[in-house]
Amino acid sequence: MTETLPADLIVRPATPEDRPTVERLWPMFRHDLSEFRGVLPGPDGTFRSEWLVSAFTAPGWAPYLVTCGERPAGFAFVRGLDGPVRVLNSFFVVRGARRQGVGLRAVRKVLLRHPGPWEIAFQHDNPAAVRFWPRVARELAEEGWTREVRPVPDRPELPPDVWISFTVPAPA
């Protein structure tokens, strides 16, 4: 039996009660990224989770849960809310919800909640990200965005990230 995604996409701040759900989604996100970074889980089979912890506990961070109907479909972590530039630290949509507009709709909802300057990093070796993130920037900032290659801080063994920068306008 094939299920279709419900039309009721919800993106809302994740609460402490949502944390176990996000924690279950986290390994899927890290597993997806491992394809482009060659990062293996630790000896205990888990991936690093500092960003997950920070999203729920650190000042200037905000976690979001993405749902389709009652079902979790992804998450987003924003950092830099207490600074001049917001950073989309992590963004994930489960594979069953991809290629249906869920990611684009979800990220728009997150970014529009925090008008102002934004930066988003992705890996050049990730063809889906190379297509997706410039599309997001063009949709929200038209031609007013930039792309820059930057080394990964404190990780010289990793290839550099591609960073896009743009400003999300305040609602009129």
Image (cartoon, rainbow, N blue to C red):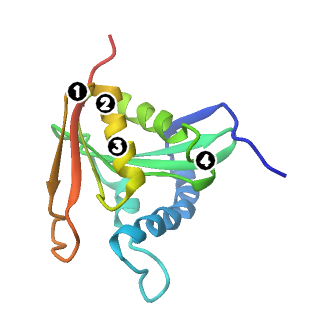
Amino acid bearing label 1: Glu
Residue bearing the label numbered 4: 97
Residue bearing the label numbered 2: 138
Say which element carries label 4. Answer: helix
Q: Spatial distance from mark 4 to mark 1, Cα to Cα? A: 28 Å
Q: Tell me the residue at 51%/46% (across/down).
A: 15
In the image shown, does 166 or 129 lie closer to the viewer?
Answer: 129
Given the current orientation, which residue lies at the most extreme bottom position? 43
In the image shown, does 36 or 51 lie closer to the viewer?
Answer: 36
Say which element carries label 2. Answer: helix
Q: Earlier in the sequence, mark 3 or mark 1?
A: 3
Residue bearing the label numbered 1: 143
Dot in front, 4 or 1:
1
Say which element carries label 1. Answer: loop
Amino acid bearing label 3: Trp
The crowd level at tag 4 (other Cα within 10 Å; few <14, some 14-19, many 20+) is some
Is 139 left, or right, of 106 in this rendering?
Answer: left
Residue bearing the label numbered 3: 133
Verify CB contact (< 8 Å) between mark 3 and mark 4: no
Verify CB contact (< 8 Å) between mark 2 and mark 3: no
